[in-house]
Amino acid sequence: MPGKTRKTPLKDADRDYLALGLEGSANKLGAGIMKHSKDGAAIVLSNIRHTYITPPGEGFQPRDTALHHREWALKVINDCLTKAGVSMHEIDCICFTKGPGMGAPLQSVALIARTLSLLFSKPLVGVNHCVGHIEMGREITGAQNPVVLYVSGGNTQVIAYSRQCYRIFGETLDIAVGNCLDRFARIINLSNDPSPGYNIEQEAKKGNRLLSLPYATKGMDISLSGILSAAEAYTQDKRFRAQGATGDEDTITPQDLCFSLQETVFAMLVEITERAMAHIGSKEVLIVGGVGSNERLQQMMGIMAQERQARVFATDERFCIDNGIMIAQAGLLSYRMGYETPLAKTTCTQRFRTDEVHVAWRA
């Protein structure tokens, strides 16, 4: 009810709680220490991340990514503990990404979590990657009950909370928005450092032509494979100049394509988000996931929200891009509700749906 605050099922902490979160569902290996203090505050003690970066034009393969995670795990976790100023003996629970994500990297991080659990006799908490993004976004921004736009390399969903479940209102029917941008970056041979999506964002700022691309919203869902194919087709056009403008007004540049791809895809995302807001009467939008750090997406969502007298909440790359602290946050909420993952159940699920999670800590 407007003007009323509903009591959460999560009881006040009787002491300080510490969780180690481990994330490795794609090419980022992350470790973070989250503290829930007895005064009710959630404090980020450390948030360390290392990214597996491939050469331009190449994506990251599951086997190579898993090898990267195994090679860097010890350093990332040690740096995480050192920065937080805590030891493994002080940790209450070890939280790890159960899914969704790439199979081999997920399994590598789950193995690391199981090993630490057995070495230090600590309980394990398997966390849904998507729920981790949402809970971290809610904690950092203070959004109360927003419509969530979750946009990353592997996921594109519009989500709203209802009855202890994050309900999916709409999603991609084929590829995720981050995957679409990454693949186009490979087509035009952009660097993967620091990330393909970031480099597309910078190139798009230099574009000045809005080229015609398929706009494919289908009810509350979107389709992105067609727009990717259409953008790629422009690179075969006789007007395309890979080295940029030549003074000819008819020239199509990589910057124009990046600009057009962003504008069209983001307009589709804003449309389905607005439709979800209208359906549930929400005045808040929370953008999470790696693509959520894109400033142009935040700007376009802000224009829509302003027209609806609503607010947009978003975080910077520390919390938008995959990280260990978001897994620690969601896992610690579950742990404080009495949930633990038995060792025999610490398998990974590549297609772990957001709406399969019982969000026991919310009213």
Image (cartoon, rainbow, N blue to C red):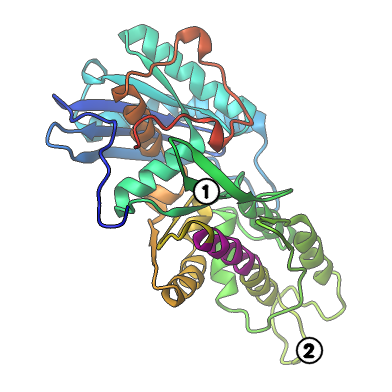
Residue under label 1? 159
- Give the magenta-colored segment's residue range: 265-278
Question: Which comes before the other along the chain, label 2 or label 1?
Answer: 1
Mark toward the viewer: 2 or 1: 1
Residue 235 versus residue 3 in the image, above or below? below
Binning the other alpha carbons within 10 Å of mark 2 as few (below 14), some (14 to 19) or many (20 upward) gives: few
- The spot of residue 335 in percent (x, y) is 33, 22
Q: Across the whole image, how many numbered discs are drawn on residues?
A: 2
Residue 316 visible, this orientation: yes
Screen quadrant of the C terminus? top left
Residue 5 versus residue 127 in the image, above or below? below
- Marks 2/1: CA distance? 41 Å
| Magenta stretch: dominant secondary structure | helix
- Which residue type does callout 2 highlight? Asp
Label 1 SS:
strand
- Which residue type does callout 1 highlight? Ile
Residue at 37 percent of width and 43 percent of height: 136
Residue under label 2? 250
Q: Are marks 2 and 1 in contact (CB under 8 Å)?
A: no
